[in-house]
Amino acid sequence: SSKCDVNDHHKNTAGLWRNSRHSGKTVGSTVPRFVIVRDPFERVLSAYRDKVQTPDPQEPYLASFFTRVLGPYRFVKKVHMDKKEELLRNAKNEAVRYLNQHKGIRSQFVYLEGQDNPYLNPLSPTFEEFVTALLLGFGNEHWIPVNLYCSPCYGPGYNYIIRTEDYDCEFNNMLHILGAHNLEGVIDENGWAKHNKNPARQGVSNAEFYEFYGTLSDSQLDGLYEWYKADCEMFQYNCKRTLCEIKKWKRLNKVELSQIKS
């Protein structure tokens, strides 16, 4: 799609409208409806780095990383198998303790020296382990395909499809279309649009993107493409090209990625 034109207030695009003063209220049928979408490959990596790599210890789904990802999909030595459940339980408790003491740590691998527990090094799932679980049914609102829970093809429908890639421009275009571009508390200097920035939405560098996806096998990459194919086609993201570029990068960069993969 073309770049968002800041002077074109008639485009059928929009930014996310989620001001706290308006949330939680009953929405009538005449109120415009919006759905926010993002390039699936960017979204998966963003969700992993923000929610999985160094999770918030208060998140209710932290335990699921141990029971549904590390337990089934982390390779451990045979000597550890007899006490697997105990090791997982101890690892979860140690992870919560560590993360509570180091709340400033975000989007990086954590290794605990002196720990013989294989579920603690690294402390959280690797990207490869996470994708393995994702493809085998580990779902969450942060990475489940959009078409599975708020498909534009069913239900009440949407007036606007929101693409985060041109977020700031599209948000203002939406308000102009609605005649609400002077809406207090939404786009003024104290508004949500300017200050509620999700760090994960800022994305990663091209190098990081390819390094993370370079740890996946071709079959995993193909699986991701098939899983998000409907989103790619429905929201006009060229995921096939992204898939090809990742595989090309893997062929041209046969280097060790130990810091990312383990």
Image (spheres, helix red, strand yellow):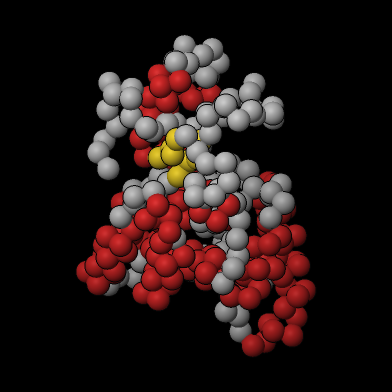
Residue 262 vertical position relative to residue 81 in the rendered view, above or below: above
Q: Which residue is at the front of the view, 125 or 26?
A: 26
Q: Quadrant of residue 68?
A: bottom right
Q: Which residue is at the front of the view, 172 or 76?
A: 172
Identify the residue shown where x is 63% and y is 43%: 103
Query: In this rendering, would 43 be left or right of 251?
Result: right
Q: Quadrant of residue 84?
A: bottom right
Identify the residue shown where x is 43% and y is 59%: 230
Residue 248 vertical position relative to residue 186 in the rendered view, above or below: below
Residue 112 point in image, percent of width and height: 61, 62
Query: In this rendering, would 257 be left or right of 89?
Result: left
Instruction: Report the residue that reaches farthest toward the left.
Output: 252
Residue 162 point in image, percent of width and height: 43, 38
Residue 167 point in image, percent of width and height: 40, 33
Instruction: Report the residue that reaches farthest toward the bottom.
Output: 78
Q: Which residue is at the front of the view, 141 or 159?
A: 159
Identify the residue shown where x is 69% and y is 84%: 81
Identify the residue shown where x is 64% and y is 47%: 56
Query: In this rendering, would 124 be left or right of 194?
Result: right
Residue 141 vertical position relative to residue 80 in the rendered view, above or below: above
Residue 207 showing in the rendered view: no
Residue 6 point in image, percent of width and height: 30, 24
Residue 31 showing in the rendered view: yes
Query: In this rendering, would 85 be left or right of 103?
Result: right
Q: Which residue is at the front of the view, 33 or 207?
A: 33
Q: Quadrant of the N terminus?
A: top left
Q: How many marks?
A: 0
